[in-house]
Amino acid sequence: MEREPLIVQDQPAFPSFLITYLYIGHFLARWGARMWEFSVGLYMISVWPDSLLLAAIYGAIESASVALFGPIVGQWVDRLTYVKVLRIWLLAQNLSFIVAGVSVVALLVSSTLKSTNFPAFILLVILTNISGAVGVISTLAGTILVEREWIVVISEGHPPELLTKMNSIIRRIDLTSKLLAPVLTGFIISFVSLKASAMTLALWTTLTVWVEYWLFLSVYKGIPALGESNRRRFTRSLPISDPEESASTSQERESLISHDGDNASTTKIGWRRKIICWVTNAPCVGAWRVYLRQEVVLPGAALALLFFTVLSFGTLMTATLEWKGIPAYVIGIARGISAIIGIAATLVYPIVQSRISTLRTGLWSIWSQWIFLFVCVGSIWIQNSLLAAYMLMAGVATSRLGLWMFDLSVIQQMQDLVPESDRCVVGGVQNSLQSTMDLMAYIMGIIISNPQDFWKLILVSFLAVTLAALLYSYHLYRIRKHIFHFDKLLASIQWLIRSSGDGALE
């Protein structure tokens, strides 16, 4: 089922410039993250040429961090006040990127460090990896807060089209950062130096953190719905304690452990119960239990499978293109074109969604992505290395239209169907699942670290997209009991045949 229009209670009006503040703050935060995301692969292939190993290890650590801590971050965002989340998110994200930038500059300045002082080299690599992982985890907290929580709260009490519009604009901002940040960074790397790009990143994050905090705080203070939601969250997070129930529970637990203390088997059962209780009450397990009982599990799993890929302008593909001799600024431009197509997806999505529903938009979008990725598969059999590289970039770029429309479709289904009390937790688990798939892709990169064997990673990635498309198709069939409206499709074909026949008679 899809969310019904909310017409019963209108939210108080708020100045429209506050929404602009939200968009600007999101843009500033995403710009720094996109600069680092694009540059890190180039840094790693420069530090250790002719191997994807460092780039793959970095990506694996980053993805593993989000996969492990994603559910915990979701619960943490759900339990803390909005202001506390803002402070921790922005401080951790920007500080980590500053440290990562400085450590990268040290690695690039001391180009012989690997041979002259290997322990120091490893220490700087570890510092870069840890800082990057912290930055990504903190960015996840901001993503959950803004994309999964705030825009849903702001749109409540307004027509459903507002949520669709805000989702599209937020994604457009992200893709605009993905477009412009790599292009600018690529030019800095190509025409100045790698060190200059790392210093630019550190300087950017130092200057913008204060502006971001002021913008987001202004939005929170100026929109009453956010304050009301914050109070509901605070009330929900208060512990409900019953002394009598607590005492009886304590007595039961003590009896399970202490009863017949001389009996070894009973004691063993007591310890087993304690272990089972501890595991089932662990934050990660509880978050996954919440996620698995949602109606959107299959679409979420399909979206996560799309992260089990090297067919994106991520660390591994960027490092491979650099190895093939593609200049950094060309990679940046190609990534920018990819982002432009993604921005087009945010413009097309509201139009398509309003005509064929959110659920069916997801079906058409994921299969369109699958079709465009055939170009990437075809590049495997091209003998000319440069032509194959350009075909690979073209296939990835054009497939972004379907990818980002599918992403928007799944996110909106989660916003429509997941209860308010579970929203942040589900968002954290979804990002954790996506990062688990991303981690598996980087593990593939570690196993197949020779850039000459990149074609194997292309095939595995294409199979993952195929599985995701089939999984989502099954989800739609399970709900609608059909995949296509064959009667409408047949009527359209007959109309086209009649129209062409009439034209021929004329």
Image (cartoon, rainbow, N blue to C red):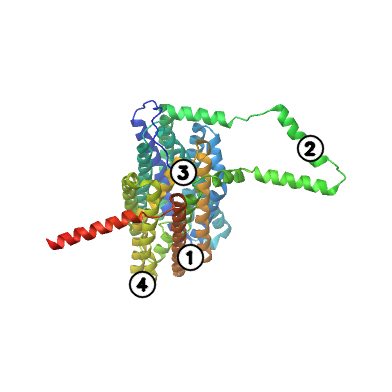
Amino acid at pointer 1: Ser
Q: Say which residue label 3 marks.
A: 414
Instruction: Please tell me which residue lies in front, 220 or 371.
Output: 371
> Outermost residue toward the right?
262
Residue 266: in sight, yes or no?
yes
Query: Mark 4, residues whose alpha carbon is within 10 Å: few (<14), some, or many (≥20)?
Result: few
Observer-side mark, 2 or 4, equals 2
Snapshot quadrant of residue 322: bottom left
Q: Residue at x 70, y 46 (%)?
A: 276
Instruction: Please tell me which residue lies in front, 182 or 379.
Output: 379
> Outermost residue toward the bottom?
383
Q: Which mark is residue 201?
A: none
Q: Which mark is residue 382?
A: 4
Snapshot quadrant of residue 17: top left
Which circle's residue, 1 or 2, is located before the other in the chain? 1
Q: How far apart are labels 2 and 4 at the CA level? A: 70 Å
Amino acid at pointer 3: Met
Residue 203: in sight, yes or no?
no
Q: Secondary structure at mark 2?
A: helix
> Outermost residue toward the left?
506
Q: Secondary structure at mark 4?
A: loop
Instruction: Please tell me which residue lies in front, 312 or 405.
Output: 405
Amino acid at pointer 2: Glu
Viewport quadrant of the C terminus: bottom left
Q: Say which residue label 1 marks.
A: 51
Query: Mark 3, residues whose alpha carbon is within 10 Å: few (<14), some, or many (≥20)?
Result: many
Q: Position of residue 336 (x, y in %)?
A: 33, 53
